[in-house]
């Protein structure tokens, strides 16, 4: 598979975005929660719940889509000789950015992927979220222009790059050994939801297959929802944006075809209408993604191709989900959690501190 | 004498920022960029071409690529 990478062309990225935009609403049709055919943050949060890292009863499920994203990217990277184990670019900072990216996403109730899918499903609150996301990324670009930099990674052992893929295989094995039993909230070591978003999911094999397919395509095309906005703000480049817009259009059309489109602000699935916090939560997330160099999906695909620093970011997000629910930071359809507002403020302070202080010029 | 930008080990979007900074300096008509991932190779190539540079040669070097670009169309 050497030679020109067709997925990295303009039509390649548009095709991949359109493909994701069709598959996500289909997953919703097959059982995933409303406007949540795919949500990287929500699904990692559900994995945290499935493992018992938090005990929010309504969001517990080892989501096969996430497992597929990492393993699909791994397969693509190996087939195309792009697997390159690397690590060591400020991992602990990436972990902290992952924690706050998740907290911001759970205040909004979705990652950039779900923000687009919510908009494509008619949820007006997503407009506030996407505006916040853009604002957060814009702040990130100011740091980037001023020399913000997490430093160089080093080539490392193949095994190091395999750690997150192996963890994902471990999750899959657990899911197969301890499958959901009708009416039970626990089987073996895994927790399951009996109601709420965690109880809603497409069949395991379908979720896994779609995850693998998207993981493969996204690794080849470098699809990134944060990069889409960042590249326009920073370079005036619309390459990645064209993929994101293709996702929006195709998800909108698919929702129309499946009668899943419902326009409005109130009563939208897994969403609240506190505009300021929809904006601020996603702004925090956008800033954290921009400082870490990729959206939550992209971090999974990078981890699949051997990037150990992206893997640390992913673990930060999973741990962040545990913190968000244990500390009452996460929102619910009723609104922002008890400590959600101070958490967003703390998150901003931490991200600004990182942005202002990590300006070591690479030699 | 071509300017050299060493972007190896740096994650997105640093390689592109460094390449554009070198281009903006305007001192070199030929720039060599060292990167270590295919993503960086594609991004740098795309950015250079958008600035009116031509990609002359991309060769494998060590565990990455050596991209040589020159000002103007070929």
Image: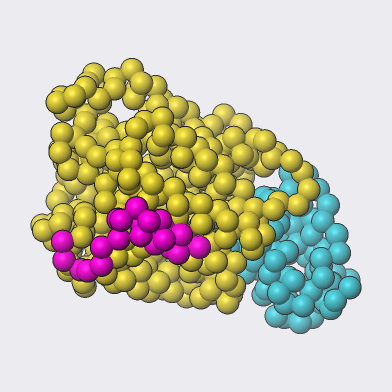
Which part of the image, by quadrant, shows the N terminus of chain B? bottom right
> Quadrant of residue A205 in the image?
top left
Pick the residue in front: B6 or B39: B39
Say which colour chain A has.
yellow
Q: Is residue A313 visible?
A: no
Q: Is residue B27 left or right of residue A152?
A: right
- Residue drawn at (43%, 74%) of the image: A138
- Residue drawn at (71%, 74%) of the image: B50
Pick the residue in front: A311 or A352: A311
Question: Would you place residue A3 above or below residue A79 in this image?
Answer: below
- Residue drawn at (72%, 77%) of the image: B51
Instruction: Based on the picture, tell me whether residue A295 belongs to the magenta stretch.
Output: no
Pick the residue in front: B8 or A174: A174
Question: Would you place residue A44 above or below residue A104 in this image?
Answer: above
Q: Is residue A277 visible?
A: yes
Say which colour chain B has.
cyan
Residue extent of the magenta highlight: A246-267
Question: Would you place residue A212 above or below residue A225 in this image?
Answer: above
Q: Is residue A42 left or right of residue B10?
A: left
């Amino acid at each position: 598979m050497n030679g020109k990478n067709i997925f990295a062309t303009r039509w390649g990225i548009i095709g991949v975005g359109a493909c994701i935009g069709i598959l996500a609403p289909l997953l919703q049709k097959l059982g995933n929660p409303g406007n949540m055919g795919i949500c990287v943050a929500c699904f990692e949060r559900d994995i945290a719940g499935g493992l018992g890292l938090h005990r929010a009863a309504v969001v517990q499920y080892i989501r096969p889509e996430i497992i597929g994203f990492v393993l699909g990217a791994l397969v693509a990277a190996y087939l195309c000789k792009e697997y390159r184990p690397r690590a060591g670019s400020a991992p602990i900072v990436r972990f902290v950015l992952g924690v706050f990216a998740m907290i911001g996403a759970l205040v909004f109730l979705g990652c950039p992927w779900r923000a687009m899918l919510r908009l494509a499903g008619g949820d007006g609150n997503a407009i506030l979220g996407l505006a916040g996301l853009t604002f957060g990324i814009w702040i990130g670009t100011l740091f980037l222009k001023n020399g913000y930099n997490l430093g160089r990674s080093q080539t490392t052992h193949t095994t190091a790059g395999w750690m997150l893929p192996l963890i994902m295989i471990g999750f899959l094995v657990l899911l197969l050994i301890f499958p959901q039993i009708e009416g039970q909230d626990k089987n073996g070591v895994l927790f399951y939801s009996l109601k709420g978003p965690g109880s809603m999911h497409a069949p395991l094999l379908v979720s896994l297959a779609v995850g693998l397919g998207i993981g493969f395509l996204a690794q080849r095309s470098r699809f990134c929802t944060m990069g889409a906005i960042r590249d326009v703000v920073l370079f005036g480049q619309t390459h990645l944006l064209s993929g994101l817009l293709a996702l929006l259009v195709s998800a909108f059309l698919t929702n129309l075809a499946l009668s899943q489109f419902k326009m409005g602000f109130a009563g939208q699935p897994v969403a609240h209408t506190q505009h300021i916090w929809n904006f601020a939560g996603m702004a925090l997330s956008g800033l954290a993604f921009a400082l870490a160099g990729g959206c939550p999906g992209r971090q999974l695909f990078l981890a699949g191709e051997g990037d150990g620093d992206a893997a640390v970011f992913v673990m930060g997000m999973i741990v962040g989900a545990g913190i968000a629910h244990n500390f009452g930071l996460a929102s619910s359809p009723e609104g922002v959690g008890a400590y959600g507002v101070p958490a967003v403020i703390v998150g901003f302070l931490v991200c600004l501190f990182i942005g202002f202080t990590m300006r070591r010029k690479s030699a | 004498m071509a300017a050299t930008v060493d972007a190896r080990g740096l994650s997105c979007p640093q390689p592109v920022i460094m390449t554009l900074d070198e281009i903006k300096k305007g001192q070199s008509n030929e720039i060599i960029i060292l990167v270590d991932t295919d993503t960086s190779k594609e991004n740098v190539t795309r950015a250079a071409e958008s600035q009116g540079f031509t990609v002359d040669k991309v060769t494998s070097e060590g565990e990455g690529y050596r991209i040589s670009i020159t000002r103007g169309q070929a």
